[in-house]
């Protein structure tokens, strides 16, 4: 069985990555959700909880990692964040490989990875899909979230590769600054293009 073509799906905070990932999934494309894997491994009984508690005392409870507490410890401190990443990222990579193996024979799969460029994951996928909307649309979406402040938003943005650079480095861009139905049409068109390519009707 052949290895699927791998699409890395990414985008900055609030750009609509999860929404677009759900569109791929609804169209029958297997989607690996890196964030969901992290949450499972950090949640109740999760396999990283003990290791995280040892590295960040007081950051876990009976329900696993206390994400707001851990976030407070790492988002303002680059070295602490790097220590957390050294625990989390290798574990996610392992799960991703297992997912790929399970889907051998499928034409292509999507890896939904928020920090694809930031952490070098773009080198490990065949194609990169970036979701992008105008900065003002992004800002309004993010600031409407509970517990979000302009300061927190600015800080998270400062940790992420700028949208303009993501767009430049993308193989495909999905516009999420338009009505959902239009975005969905773009997703379906991309899926059709990839099927055509894989079927050998166009050069890869
Ligand atoms: C610190 C944690 C527990 C905070 O969880 P919380 O639910 O409060 O925030 P959430 O995960 O939704 O992140 C908020 C925003 O920060 C960004 N962000 C998260 N981790 C990082 C990071 N390591 N570097 C830069 N930005 C990050 C996210 O993309 C998102 O836009 C969590 O973010 C975490 O475990 N991060 C480290 C693992 C990681 O890198 N995960 C993201 C990709 S797999
Ligand atoms: N055309 C569109 N495409 C995608 N999302 C849209 C669109 N129009 C409106 N939205 C809304 O924008 C929001 C995007 O949130 P979503 O959780 O998908 O973003 P995200 O990039 O995954 O966020 P984060 O990186 O912060 O987790 C959703 O509430 C979605 O309904």
Image (cartoon, grey):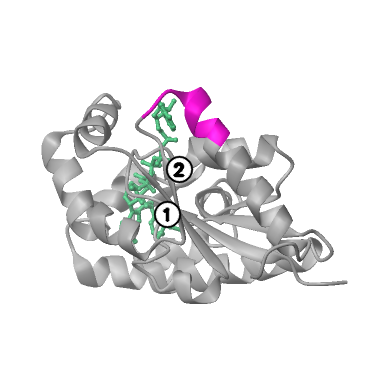
Q: What residue does disc 1 label?
A: 114
Label 2 belongs to which residue? Answer: 17
For label 1, the SS is loop
Write down the quadrant of residue 4 in the picture. bottom right
The quadrant of the rendering that contains the C terminus is: bottom right
Tell me which residue sits at (70%, 50%) in the image. 30
- Nearer mark to the viewer, of 2 and 1: 2
Assign the N terminus to one quadrant of the image.
bottom right
The answer to which of marks 2 and 1 sits earlier in the sequence is 2
Image vertical order of residue 194 relative to residue 14, above or below: below
Tag of residue 189: none
Q: Is mark 2 within 8 Å of ligand 2?
A: yes
Q: Cβ–Cβ below 8 Å for labels 2 and 1?
A: yes
Q: Is residue 147 above or below residue 173?
A: above
The CA span between labels 2 and 1 is 8 Å
Cβ(mark 1) to ligand 1 < 8 Å? Answer: yes
């Amino acid at each position: 069985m052949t290895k699927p073509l791998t699409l890395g799906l990414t985008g900055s905070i609030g750009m609509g990555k999860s929404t677009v990932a759900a569109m791929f999934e609804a169209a029958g494309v297997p989607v690996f959700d890196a964030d969901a894997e992290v949450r499972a491994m950090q949640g109740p009984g999760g396999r990283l909880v003990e290791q995280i508690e040892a590295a960040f005392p007081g950051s876990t409870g009976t329900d696993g990692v206390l994400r707001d507490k851990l976030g407070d410890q790492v988002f303002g401190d680059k070295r602490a964040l790097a220590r957390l990443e050294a625990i989390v990222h290798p574990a996610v990579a392992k799960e991703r490989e297992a997912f790929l193996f399970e889907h051998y024979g499928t034409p292509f799969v999507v890896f939904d990875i928020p920090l694809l460029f930031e952490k070098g994951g773009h080198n490990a996928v065949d194609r990169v899909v970036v979701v992008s909307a105008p900065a003002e649309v992004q800002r309004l979406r993010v600031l409407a979230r509970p517990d979000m402040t302009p300061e927190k938003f600015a800080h998270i943005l400062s940790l992420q590769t700028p949208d303009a650079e993501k767009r430049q480095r993308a193989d495909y861009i999905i516009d999420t600054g338009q009505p959902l139905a239009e975005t969905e049409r773009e997703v379906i068109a991309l899926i059709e293009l990839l099927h055509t390519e894989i079927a050998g009707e166009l050069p890869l």
